[in-house]
Amino acid sequence: MSSENKRQSEEQPLNELVSKILKAYGLQDKMKNYDLIAAWPQLMGPAVAKRTTDIRIENQVLYLKIDSSVMRDELFHGKQIIIERCNQHAKEIIIRDIWFS
């Protein structure tokens, strides 16, 4: 086998290589969490994003600090829809519950 053929057979798409590196260093879940947090304005719209003052994910729980009690109550009642929307965005279950403050 020539060196060029060997090199071509060992080549991998960049996204596969990045995925393997993230998995090897245990960063895959953190990257998915950061991606979800970054997508929050698109997922929930500008009104909710503007009122969200803190967002974090720990142990599959999405913690949201909302500066409007009315909006916090509305979001609480739509909690399951938010969970589904977040997991659809991630293409896997990364959120199982939401806590509001």
Image: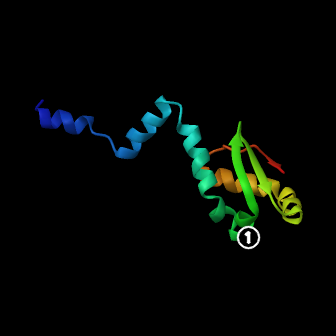
- Residue 50 shown left or right of residue 8 in the figure: right
Q: What is the x, y in percent for residue 75?
A: 82, 60
Q: Residue furthest left?
A: 2
Q: What is the x, y in percent for residue 82?
A: 75, 56
Q: Quadrant of the N terminus?
A: top left
**Mark 1, residue position:** 47
- Residue 48 shown left or right of residue 25 in the figure: right
Picture residue at 59% right of the left edge, 48% below the top:
34
Q: Is residue 28 above or below residue 52?
A: above
What colour-coding does the image apply? rainbow
Secondary structure state at the residue bearing disc 1: helix
Can you tell which quarter of the image residue 72 is in? bottom right
- Residue 32 shown left or right of residue 61 in the figure: left
Q: Residue furthest bottom?
A: 47
Picture residue at 40% right of the left edge, 45% below the top:
15
Picture residue at 69% right of the left edge, 46% below the top:
56
The three-letter amino acid code for the residue at tag 1 is Ala
Q: What is the x, y in percent for residue 80?
A: 80, 53
